[in-house]
């Protein structure tokens, strides 16, 4: 009995009872605070209960990528129930745009050093494996803090570099029979470095970025018949031609996260920084801080306010909040996390969804990545539909593999629920509630 | 003197002195009425003077395509100074969105049978050549009615099937030394039927519509190495595979005019009608009435009102207004109007611009069409920029040929100034005011 009381007090202490700038009463409960990772790391979480049936709806973990980016950005800018206005007031996202319409969602800032998360041991090794272990430890702690969620149908979702976080974490979770893992959902995931990079060249050409002459040169110098190699052991002529293509893609002011969206306040220094980052031939990712073309100043202002930090139970030991941390020393280990998908698909269903306007992790590369695993397709590639005020609409296209679904979201960029909230909502609700 | 007075009276009678639903006084003059084509055809025009220097700014003729579509749609939905609200009130388009910020614009409904235009001889042959002759006659009549415009720098602009209208008309205009033709601007023009159709298959694949299996089948059945043929004398296996691709492209509810835009009130009957239209292997275009996915009900309601027709000087002999006429019997003659471009480019500068989200006349096909003429490129394919509140932005990409410029407008569909008014405005202003 004592133990139970301690636990109840524990989560009750994390309840967010008010938020600066929020005028109305929310029709759901939310909690924030810290979950313990390993080695003294303290991972900040923000948990929003479902607006429908919190006691029955599934539990979803949401992870933004980077590595180095905060999952709070996912909450306020993509799929959470609230967002921050320019004047720092807090507003509700429409019910049919927020994913807590059908799930309880745990947003986790990971690894230590990201957002409000920190480590007591600042010499801690940070790489893909330690991040997965820390995330697993944090989930276990969450179930201790919130024991009434411990048997709930559990989903892990996220985007971008979460294409590595999620399979590596899930590999650990499936070994734990006390966790009721049902599914994984990865949005614009970095599934395979080489394929992602190779496909970007084709994506750029057929979206009008390269032009016929440069494309002809690329084919001449980098391809033999149908087979092209734009990365790795390639000729210097091919390398030189690719440099020209990369210059246009990365440094002419295009918004890489959504080709058809403007670039907000693009500082040239970020272009250079990003250009360095994109050299995927290198063995480590450099972290690049705030992503170019986004204006994150509102979130930064809000989350650095003392009254906000107090309301959210942020520790004094946390660093000043940023969308993506540039100070983190992160060693990447999995250049093709997609290889983990086939065995995971025997334990849970997997959604790989891609906004088709993203050039950071483009959908062509996603499709080739899952195809490269050798999983057979089931049925045809075909459009999927949803319904809104204008009637039945094409949301994108989909292919089914055994317990794995590849889905494009038409008109979305890297941040799918942020760019196309209606389509993303229908897609994710369907994934959560219905097996393939 | 007498003659001059008659002419002045003539255009003065066409002035639009008030418009139902328009509350404010417009800072420019506008006129509407009829211009005489040949064989008794009466072509309806709407002329808006420039908001800057009407006495000095160039004169631009604007032609919508189809064949069968009304250029008034271009005025109210794309690049004109006013638009019609849902409640049938008339509002002004922002100065930096309307093209009469830098030009006097003559919107012409052509050929007879389109919009408010009609023919006294209802057995009149309507084809590409007679349309060009009628348009030329109408221009001559315009210069008679508005003699103070007769020496003005003259531009012919338009979109879609105007890819045929404009070169065929310009070929006649350049023979008339009394007309000061400076340039042609064609937006998402149907420049070459075969190339347009062939490139659509590639466009669809790299925009995620076909999927890897169907694409592999297409390459297997329709290609030999790099060379693919998706139209004409092709094997039955290739033909069957293309039918599968076409079914998705045309009948699954995609908005062909802008891939990333929803389809408004899509009636299935139109899908079938459109499917028939799109069989470009046929020797004639069927006209297909109102284009699928667009909701033109507001324009139709407004232009069918008696008080509106009176204010616009519409004849009682005109048929009820529609966006695109389905009753017209139009014989197409030019399957590759782009062949007329090289000789025209010796007389005037030519802009070929393409919204890159259009699947009716896709930009890849546009690029290949102009390239197929054998004109050499000058310099590199490269991004072009414009400036707005967010700073310098990529508007699209461009290649220069001798006196011909190929330009993409990033994020625009078939109706470029409607979809991307800011980018289109900068592009067109630059084209009108500065030689390449």
Image (spheres, coloured by chain):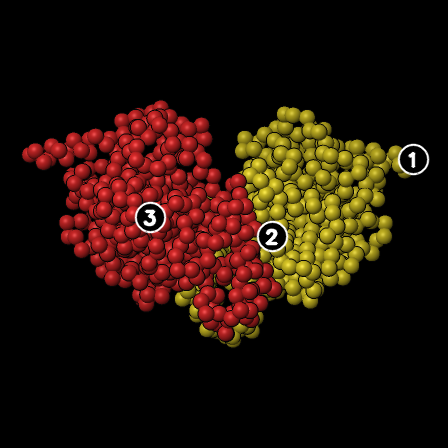
Chain colours: A red, B yellow
Question: Helix, strand, or loop for circle 3?
Answer: strand
Question: Helix, strand, or loop for circle 1?
Answer: helix
| Residue where numbered disc 3 is placed | A158
Residue B238 lies, with reference to residue A296, above or below; the image says: below
Chain for numbered disc 3: A
Q: Residue at x 79, y 50 (%)?
A: B181
Q: Which mark is residue B402?
A: none
Residue B175 lies, with reference to residue B85, above or below; the image says: below
In terms of sequence position, does the residue under pointer 2 or pointer 1 come before the other? Answer: 1
Residue B249, visible in the rendered structure? no
Residue B86, visible in the rendered structure? yes
| Residue where numbered disc 2 is placed | B383
As drawn, the residue found furthest toward the left would be A1
Marks 3/2: CA–CA distance = 33 Å
Instruction: Name the image quarter holding residue A59.
Output: top left
Q: Residue at x 41, y 49 (%)?
A: A287
Residue B152 lies, with reference to residue B18, above or below; the image says: below
Q: Quadrant of the N terminus of chain A?
A: top left
Tell which of B116 and B85 is nearer to you.
B85
As drawn, the residue found furthest toward the top would be A23
The location of residue A22, given as percent across then percent down, is 35, 26
Q: Quadrant of the C terminus of chain A?
A: bottom left
Question: Helix, strand, or loop for circle 2?
Answer: strand
The location of residue B21, given as percent across then percent down, is 61, 28
Left or right: residue B237 versus residue A214 is left
- The nearer-to-camera label among 2 and 1 is 2
Chain for numbered disc 1: B
Tell which of A119 and B316 is nearer to you.
A119
Instruction: Name the image quarter holding residue B298.
Output: top right
Marks 1/3: CA–CA distance = 79 Å
Q: Residues within 10 Å of mark 3 (few under 14, many from 20)?
A: many
| Residue where numbered disc 1 is placed | B2
């Amino acid at each position: 009995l004592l133990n139970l009381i301690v636990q109840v007090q524990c989560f009750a202490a994390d309840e967010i009872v008010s938020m600066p700038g929020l005028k109305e009463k929310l029709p759901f409960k939310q909690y924030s605070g810290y979950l313990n990772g390993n080695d003294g790391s303290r991972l900040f979480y923000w948990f929003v209960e479902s607006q429908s049936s919190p006691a029955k709806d599934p539990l979803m973990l949401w992870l933004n990528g980077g590595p180095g980016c905060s999952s709070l950005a996912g909450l306020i800018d993509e799929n959470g129930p609230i967002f921050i206005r320019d004047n720092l007031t807090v507003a509700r996202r429409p019910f049919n745009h927020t994913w807590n319409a059908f799930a309880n969602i745990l947003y986790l800032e990971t690894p230590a050093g990201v957002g409000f998360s920190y480590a007591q041991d600042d010499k801690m090794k940070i790489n893909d494996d330690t991040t997965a272990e820390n995330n697993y430890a944090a989930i276990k702690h969450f179930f201790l803090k919130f024991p009434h969620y411990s048997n709930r149908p559990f989903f892990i979702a996220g985007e971008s570099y979460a294409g590595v976080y999620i399979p590596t974490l899930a590999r650990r979770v499936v070994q734990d029979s006390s966790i009721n893992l049902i599914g994984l959902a990865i949005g614009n995931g970095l599934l395979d470095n080489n394929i992602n990079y190779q496909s970007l060249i084709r994506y750029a050409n057929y979206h009008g970025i390269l032009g016929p002459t440069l494309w002809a040169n690329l084919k001449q110098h980098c391809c033999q018949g149908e087979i092209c190699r734009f990365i790795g052991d390639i000729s210097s002529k091919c390398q030189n031609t690719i440099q020209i293509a990369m210059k246009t893609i990365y440094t002419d002011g295009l918004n890489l996260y959504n080709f058809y969206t403007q670039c907000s306040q693009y500082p040239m220094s970020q272009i250079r920084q990003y250009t360095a980052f994109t050299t995927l031939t290198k063995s480590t990712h450099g972290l690049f801080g705030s992503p170019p073309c986004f204006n994150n100043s509102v979130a930064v202002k809000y989350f650095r306010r003392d009254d906000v930090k107090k309301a959210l139970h942020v520790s004094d030991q946390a660093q000043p909040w940023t969308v993506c941390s540039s100070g983190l020393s992160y060693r990447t280990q999995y250049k093709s996390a997609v290889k983990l998908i086939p065995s995971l698909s025997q334990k849970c269903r997997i959604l790989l969804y891609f906004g088709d306007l993203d050039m950071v992790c483009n959908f062509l590369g996603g499709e080739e990545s899952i195809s490269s695993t050798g999983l057979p397709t089931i049925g045809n590639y075909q459009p999927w539909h949803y319904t809104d005020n204008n009637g039945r609409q094409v949301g994108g296209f989909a292919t089914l593999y055994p317990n794995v679904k590849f889905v494009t979201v038409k008109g979305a960029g890297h941040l799918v629920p942020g760019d196309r909230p209606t389509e993303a909502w229908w897609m994710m609700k369907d994934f959560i509630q219905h097996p393939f």
